[in-house]
Amino acid sequence: MIVLVCILLASYLIGAIPFGLLFGRAAGKDVRRSGSGNIGATNVARLLGKKLGILTLLCDVAKGFLPVYIASILLPKTANYELYVALSGLVTVLGHMFSVYLRFQGGKGVATALGVFLFFSPLSVLFALLLFLVVVRVSGFVSAGSLAAAALIPLFIWMLDGSNAVLVVAGVIAALIWIKHSANIGRLLRGEEKSLKNKGAR
């Protein structure tokens, strides 16, 4: 049990690292005060360029994958092994969304969740990414693509015979991502969300 507690704590602390904010500060800008105010890759790319946006994306994905991978190695293979590993993934995403380093504020968790699911079900991630790209291409909204991918990745995991523990955690993470996107959902409904299509038109 001590090992589990230590792993969950470490998972949270790793997930809580605000890479987007750190890269922004290194470039002389607080990304929380400009654009959407989010610390994720989309806002970083919008404010600081594609290179830092991609770097933020890769780091956020890596910090989702790494704690789960470590948990899978260090946790004993007990009856609840899959549940405990899955919980480490959930805690990692919670760390990103409610970072202790940012007074329990944080990002929306999409990239970090991507890293978590990449460990459990790479093929589900591939399907979710394809869905994301199609929705963004058709709608022009990154948020719409993220919401669609989050909503359906539990279904993809179920279709690919993921364990019940992973399926439940995927459902919780998907719900949390939708909750963190509540402002985006409101803007989408009001027709006020920033569109990549409009950006291209300018």
Image (cartoon, rainbow, N blue to C red):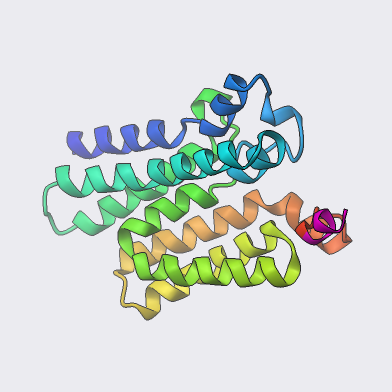
Classify residue 178 by image quadrant.
bottom right
35 left or right of 168 in image: right
Q: Position of residue 3 (x, y in %)?
A: 18, 36
Front in this rendered view, residue 29 or 111: 29
42 left or right of 149 in image: right
Magenta-highlighted residues: 197-202
- The residue furthest bottom is 159
From the image, which quarter does the N terminus lie in?
top left
Q: Position of residue 73 (x, y in %)?
A: 16, 46
Seen at 53% across and 60% down, the residue is: 174
Seen at 60% across and 67% down, the residue is: 133
User: Is residue 189 depicted above or below 127 in this figure?
Assistant: above
Q: Is residue 91 visible?
A: no
196 left or right of 155 in image: right
Predominant SS along the magenta part: helix
- The residue furthest left is 77
Q: Is residue 26 visible?
A: yes
Q: Position of residue 121 (x, y in %)?
A: 34, 65
User: Is residue 65 depicted above or below 95 in this figure?
Assistant: below
Seen at 66% across and 70% down, the residue is: 135
Front in this rendered view, residue 130 or 10: 130
Seen at 11% across and 48% down, the residue is: 76
Front in this rendered view, residue 13 or 197: 197
Front in this rendered view, residue 28 or 38: 28
Residue 108 covered by magenta stretch:
no
Q: How many marks?
A: 0
133 left or right of 165 in image: right
